[in-house]
Image (cartoon, helix red, strand yellow):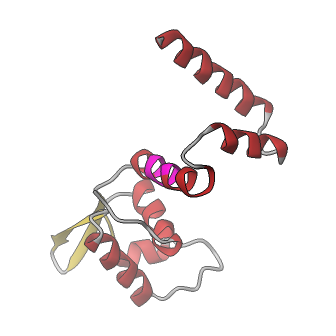
Amino acid sequence: MFRSIARSELDVMTIIWDHPGLAASDVHAALPDGDDRSLQTIKTLLSRLVDKSALRVERDGRRYLYHPLITRDTYAASATRRFSERLFGGRAAPIVAHLAKGDGLSDSDIAELEAIIRELKARD
């Protein structure tokens, strides 16, 4: 299992999830405008992600290509679980209530949640 991924590492993971098999220079070039991290910083972040078993690296001639070892969904589930446990004792309902109170749920979000609840109830 992978270790926790820092915010700066998550920025790199997002690029790799969207475009697996990039070299460090490609990841650096894909940073959003205004992100002034150096190529060396990106290489350090990639190395950390390899050490955390979030990425694998393959040699391609003189460069190294990075591929995700975890999916975005797997990471999201793990991060959500850790967040829920830290702030809400592992309960999902307070998270949804918190989002709803802060106008964080659109009509489509509510419809999607209702569909999920119907599906969960149908399993019982």
Q: Residue at x 40, y 72 (%)?
A: 26
Q: Pick whichever, 93 or 24, lies toward us.
A: 93
Judged left or right of residue 53, residue 74 is right
Rendered view: 82 above or below 117: below
Q: Residue at x 33, y 77 (%)?
A: 48
Question: Which is more toward the observer, 68 or 24?
Answer: 68
| Image location (x, y in percent) of residue 120 | 53, 19
The residue closer to the viewer here, 12 or 97, is 97
**Extreme residue in the front direction:** 89
In the figure, is residue 105 to the left or right of 90?
A: right
Q: Which residues are magenta?
A: 76-81
Q: Position of residue 6 (x, y in %)?
A: 48, 71
At 53% from the left edge and 50% from the top edge, which residue is drawn? 80
For the N terminus, which image quadrant?
Answer: bottom left
Residue 76: x percent and y percent? 48, 50
* Residue 77 magenta-highlighted: yes
The answer to whether residue 18 is above or below residue 94 is below
Task: Give the mark count.
Answer: 0
